[in-house]
Image (cartoon, rainbow, N blue to C red):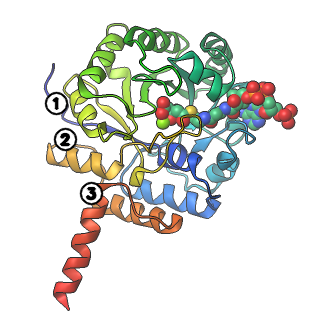
Amino acid sequence: MTSLPASVTLVEVGPRDGLQNEPQTVPLTVKVDLIGRLAEAGLRRIEAGAFVSPKWVPQMADTADVLAGLPARPDVSYPVLVPNEKGLERAMAAGAREIAVFAAASESFSQRNINCTIAESLARFAPVCRTAQDSGLRVRGYVSCVLGCPYEGAVAPDAVAEVAERLAGLGCAELSLGDTIGTGTPGKAVAMVEAVAARIPRERLAVHFHDTYGQALANIYACLQHGIAVIDCAVAGLGGCPYAKGASGNVASEDVLYMLDGLGIETGVHLDRLLEASRFVTDALGRTPVSKTARAFSANHRERKTLQR
Ligand code: HMG
Ligand code: MG
């Protein structure tokens, strides 16, 4: 166990991981506006979409248009998911500067999510990573199902470490460890992180918790204590995974930021502006935020208004 980091990088994945799972089509203007607001809030890494098959995930079909619509901000990176060489070609044609490849620690999830075995996926990613790096793109690697698989149940920490190490070997600068179905608890999360950190420096690791069982903040706090300083989160707690039924959204960015602010950990993100972005997207989708922080601030706001009358 180490002391808590002085600063943390938040990777906002709502526009991709959140919106990929929406039953309704989210208009392009809403996506572009949302990402602009997240950048205004101080987020510097915002996953903007995915160049996956539009037959598999129709919600991400307009990712090239999203990238084209974004304000050119050299201080903000807009990574996109890429599952194969075709995805990389599309990403590069659209001007992406950072991509993420995504493998799984469980065979069944790999099959359902990207229609191939883990070994086949790694072979598929090798030329993608090579070309991306040769072209100066930064590459992130995801490992899904690090704390449980919707089809196979428990997943061994060593299986996660093995896939993470293989992705690192392909040139992924950062490895994001995804609790896709949110079944993890702090002790198991730490055991998994330590198994990976035995093979890859922890400065290169990020954690990606879905909050299905309400464990995400506790898991993040435990991982912070173990030297992890890159955290994925989604504004308003949007999302889930189309290939993991019942999985809820990522941990809400507002809740993570509220905790980090309370701990005195620097992020460069402004809670008030993040709450505005959260209100914007939940209004656009016609729903209340999953984020408790967003709900509490919204209730306090209403209360203040009533008292002012
Ligand atoms: P496949 O059907 O095996 O692929 O899908 P294929 O190569 O046989 O191609 C089938 C058709 O798709 C062809 O078109 C290809 O051209 C086209 P057709 O000839 O039938 O007209 N195609 C593409 N089109 C556009 N862009 C592409 C592309 N590739 C093929 N890149 C494939 C394999 C990997 C493509 C598919 O399974 C796929 O797109 N899967 C993506 C699933 C996905 O996006 N899942 C959600 C993201 S992962 C996640 O959420 C977890 C994460 O958040 C971390 C965590 O929480 O754990 C990251
Ligand atoms: Mg995810």
Q: Amino acid at mark 3?
A: Thr
The answer to which of 155 and 285 lies nearer the viewer is 155
Image coordinates for residue 145, horizontal then vertical, percent: 47, 24
**Cα–Cα gap, marks 1 and 2:** 8 Å
Question: Relative to residue 114, is residue 305 depicted above or below?
Answer: below
Residue at the spot x=43%, y=16% of the render? Answer: 155
Q: Which residue is mark 2?
A: 265
Quadrant housing residue 154 = top left
Q: Which residue is mark 3?
A: 293
Quadrant housing residue 291 = bottom left
Q: Residues within 10 Å of mark 2 (few under 14, many from 20)?
A: some
Question: Relative to residue 136, is residue 241 depicted above or below?
Answer: below
Image coordinates for residue 194, horizontal then vertical, percent: 29, 14
**Which residue appears farthest toward the bottom when viewing the image?**
309
Image coordinates for residue 50, horizontal then vertical, percent: 62, 40
Image coordinates for residue 151, horizontal then vertical, percent: 53, 24
Q: Is residue 124 left or right of residue 34?
A: right
Q: Residues within 10 Å of mark 1 (few under 14, many from 20)?
A: some
Q: Mark 3 or mark 1: which comes first in sequence?
A: 1
The answer to which of 172 and 219 lies nearer the viewer is 219
Q: Which residue is mark 1?
A: 4
Residue at the spot x=57%, y=57% of the render? Answer: 31
Residue at the spot x=55%, y=52% of the render? Answer: 72
Rendered-image quarter of ligand 1: top right
**Cα–Cα gap, marks 2 and 3:** 17 Å
> Which mark lies nearer to you, 2 or 3?
3
